[in-house]
Image (cartoon, grey):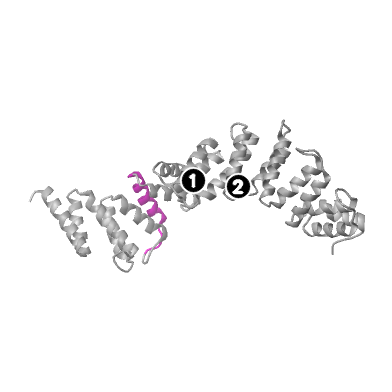
Amino acid sequence: MPSDRMMEYDYAMGQDCLASGQYEDAVMYFRKAARLGAPEAASEIGMLGEKFERGVLGPPDQKKAFLCYEIGVEFHDEHSLLQMGKLFMHGFPGYRPNIRKARRLLEEASEKGNREAAALLARMFDEGTLGKVNRPQAFQYYLLAAQRGDPGAMLMTGLFYAEGGLVPKDVRIAEQWIRKGRELQDPDGDLTLRTFLGVACIEYITGQAGRIDDRMAFSMAEEAAGLGDYEVWLRLGETYRDADRRPGHEDRAFECFKKGAVYESAASQSALGLCWESGIGTKPDVEEAVRWYRKAAGNGDAFAMARLGYAYENGAGTAKDEKKAMEWLIQAALRGDQGAVRTLHDDYGYTLS
C-alpha cells in the first residue's frame, strides 16, 4: 500500500479507536500515521495525553499522559512540547522537577508559536526559576507572548514600559498593553490597571510621563478611584501641593483633596482641613478647617486629631476647651504624632507612659 494511503488508513483507524474508547490502540495508529508524515496524528496523541492528565477519560493518570506527551515530543508536536515542559517544571510521580529540560521543551514549543510556552518562559526568567533573574530575557518572552495574544503577558509588557529602564519608558504604550490584557479578562487586569493609573496620573503632573498634562492626570485619577484606589486623590493632591509652584497648582491640590474626602479618606479630609486653615487653593476659613479636622479625626487620622486639639486649646474656629484639647492631643500622641507629644509635655506637663 502506498505510504500516503497507509498514512490515511492509520490516521482513520486511530480516530475509530479513539471514538470507541480504545485509547492504547488509538495511540498506536496515530504514532504510525505520524511516522508516515501526518503531524495532526501527533497532535491527537498530545491532546489525548492532556485528557489523561486532566481526568477527562477517567481518574487522572499522569503516567499515561507522560507516555502520550513523550510520543508527541518525538514528532515535535507543539502541544506535547508545552505539556511535557509543564510536567518537568513542577515534577510528577516518579519524576523530580527538571527545570533545564522544561526550559528546552518550552523553548521549542515557543519557537513553534505557542504563546503559553512563551509566557511560562517569561515568568521563569522573571522569577529566577532558572537560577537567577534575567529581566531582559523575561521581557523578550513577555512581549512575544503578548504579541501572540496572552493577556497576562500583555499586562507584564505594559508594566515593563511603565517602569522604563530596561526598555525606554513609554506610558502611552504601557497603557495600551495593560488595557488590552484587561479587555481579554485577565484576572489581574483591574488591579494592574488601577496600579498603573495611580502612578501614571502623578507622572503626568511631574513630567515623568514625557509631558505635563493636568487633564490626563485628573482623568486617570478618576478611573483609578472608580477601580477602588480611593487614596489616589490624596497622592495627586499632595503632589500638586508639594511640587514646584506653578499657576493653579494649589487650586488643583484643593480640588483633589475634596474629591478624596468624598470617599471618606481620612487623610484627604485632614489635608482638606489644612487647605482651609492655611488658605491653600481657597480663602482661609478656620471654622471650615475645624469641621474637616473633626471628620478626619473621627476616621482615625492622627494629624487631624492634633490640629483639632490645637484648635480647642487656642479657641480657633471653635470654642476654647482645654479638656477636649487634651483629649484630642492624647489621641494624636498615642497614634504617633510627635507635635502632639511635645504640646502635651510643654503646655500641660503631660507625658505618655
Label located before the other in sequence (1 or 2): 1
Residue under numbered circle 1? 155
From where the camera sits, is residue 322 visible? yes
Residue under numbered circle 2? 225
Highlighted range, magenta: 95-112
| Residue sitting farthest toward the bottom | 59
The image shows residue 233 at horizontal and vertical percentages of 66, 45
From where the camera sits, is residue 136 visible? no
Instruction: Decide: few, some or many residues near mark 2? Use Cα within 10 Å; few <14, some 14-19, many ≥20.
Output: some
Q: Is residue 96 magenta?
A: yes
Q: Nearer the viewer, residue 200 or 214?
A: 214
The image shows residue 254 at horizontal and vertical percentages of 72, 40
Q: Secondary structure at mark 2?
A: helix
| Residue sitting farthest toward the left | 1
Viewed as shown, does residue 218 lie left or right of 353? left
Q: Secondary structure at mark 1?
A: helix
Give the number of the disc on residue 39.
none
Magenta residues, dominant SS class: helix
Residue at 54% x, 50% y is: 191
Tag 1: amino acid: Leu
- Image height of 229 relative to 162, above or below: below
Q: Quadrant of the C terminus?
A: bottom right
Viewed as shown, does residue 10 lie left or right of 150? left
- Image height of 171 relative to 69, above or below: above
The image shows residue 314 at horizontal and vertical percentages of 90, 50
Q: Nearer the viewer, residue 315 or 12?
A: 315
Residue 235 occupies which quadrant of the picture? top right
The image shows residue 26 at horizontal and vertical percentages of 20, 60
Viewed as shown, does residue 159 lie left or right of 257? left
Q: Is residue 143 magenta?
A: no
* Real-space Cα separation, disc 1 to disc 2, in angstroms: 20 Å
Residue at 82% x, 51% y is: 307
